[in-house]
Amino acid sequence: MAGTGKSTIAITVAKRFNAKGLLAASFFFKRGEEDRGNAKKLFSTLAKQLANKFPQLAASIGKAIDNDPDISEKVSSEQFDKLILRPLVETGLNHKVRMVIVIDALDECEESDVKVVLRMLPRVQQSHSLRLRFLLTSRPELAIRSGFRSESVLYDNHQDFILHEIPKPVIERDISLYFNIRFSELRDERSLPPDWPGQETIQVLVERAVPLFIFAVTLYRFISEGRRNPARRLEAILADQTTYTSKMDGTYMPVLNQLLAGQDEEESQQFIREFKETVGVIILLYSPLSKRALASLLNVDTNEIENRLMFLHSVLNIPHDSDTPVRMLHLSFRDFLLDPKKKDTNPFWIDEKDMHAFVFHQSLGVMKRNLRKNICQLNSYGTRRNEVDDDRINEHLPPEVRIP
């Protein structure tokens, strides 16, 4: 399920196996990002990491690229065959130790690509030079489940581990451990009392978070973010006794309600309107944009975007600079804001259809302000796209008007 800690586990496993010299490669899918929302770069990325890890494979992979310089643009099955399977089969590595490849969030890959990936991976068993195992994490989406069933002959030796079926006491222990470590670090950073916030308070937070690890992370980020008083932030969380219909509400509503504290009705309405404009664009875009590009799309100053995002670090990944994309921390935030069941109960609810229309209208404005004849100042109107240097495109075409 969403928020159970799949990516946290994948990252931890990758780091541990890498430290032991047992990580062969890794890839982390992320829906909505051009290079990570599909399998277009999956096998070329894994091949590069395998070549770095095993120099014996590098020559065979390099030969495949020399024979087909456009291999990275070919279909995924052909990339897998030429960049991974053939080098593994043809190279006499004779590596006895079993290595691991970590692939995270397969459900965030395009569905058509998922079927190809699940069909390709078991074929590495044809190789006797390098023994590979794959750790895949995913939501239990239909395409994933049916993919394993359709390839049942190849996946006879696969094992499932279902995070949301872990016994509740185990989850409580893990989340409690997380809170204790984080609050210990926060006490040292902020010179807080050694007994703050106390085991009873931590237990309350644990009960609110179980069974979803992402909510524990979100609660802590909200309490500890920026220069705000963590004790007051914690009090705000504890004081919110509203009975929510889901864990998602119980985590995100206190965070968002705090944004309206101390504002009158007019200020609150303006804030909510700006929130929906800005965050609505962020959660719906196919490819994430930087603060500078968001400002251009919304036709406001970059400083205005900075101000709008200032208090959203607990739910968004907001970089310090203006040219790195702003991203969601977790897809559950998008699900929460777009849930049609919350239309009448959540003041921050975003109408997906209306927001798409808004983005369309703003995109027309961006194109009107930026596009012009021979925008890249080429010498010939007959110049092909693949003949235009990327640096020239980056110089003349801002991110918000490029096609991903």
Image (cartoon, rainbow, N blue to C red):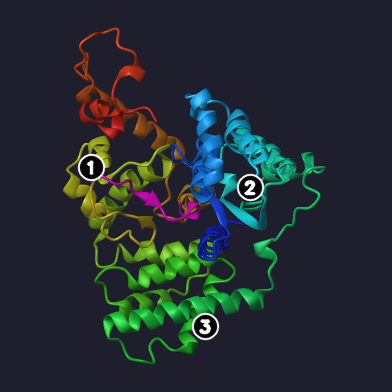
| Quadrant for the N terminus in the image | bottom right
Q: What element carries label 2?
A: loop
At 27% across and 81% down in the image, what residue appears? 190
Residue 330, percent from left and from top:
47, 55
Q: Which mark is residue 203?
A: 3
Closest to the observer, 16 or 275: 16
Front tag of 1 and 2: 2
Q: Does the magenta stretch include residue 72?
A: no
State the residue position of label 2: 93
Q: Is residue 327 magenta?
A: yes
Q: What element carries label 1?
A: helix
Asked if the residue under mark 2 is in contact with the one under mark 3, i.e. CB atoms within 8 Å, the reply is no
**Disc 3 or 2, which lies upstream in sequence?**
2
Q: Mark 2 is on which residue type?
A: Leu
Q: Mark 3 is on which residue type?
A: Gln
Asked if the residue under mark 1 is in contact with the one under mark 3, i.e. CB atoms within 8 Å, the reply is no
Q: Mark 1 is on which residue type?
A: Arg
How dense is the environment of label 2, judged by Cα within 10 Å: few (below 14), some, or many (20 and up)? some
Left or right relative to 104: residue 36: left
Residue 399, percent from left and from top:
29, 34
At 37% across and 61% down in the image, what residue appears? 256
State the residue position of label 1: 292
How dense is the environment of label 3, judged by Cα within 10 Å: few (below 14), some, or many (20 and up)? some
Closest to the observer, 98 or 104: 98
Front tag of 3 and 1: 1
At 54% across and 25% down in the image, what residue appears? 74
Q: What element carries label 3?
A: helix
- Range shown magenta: 323-333
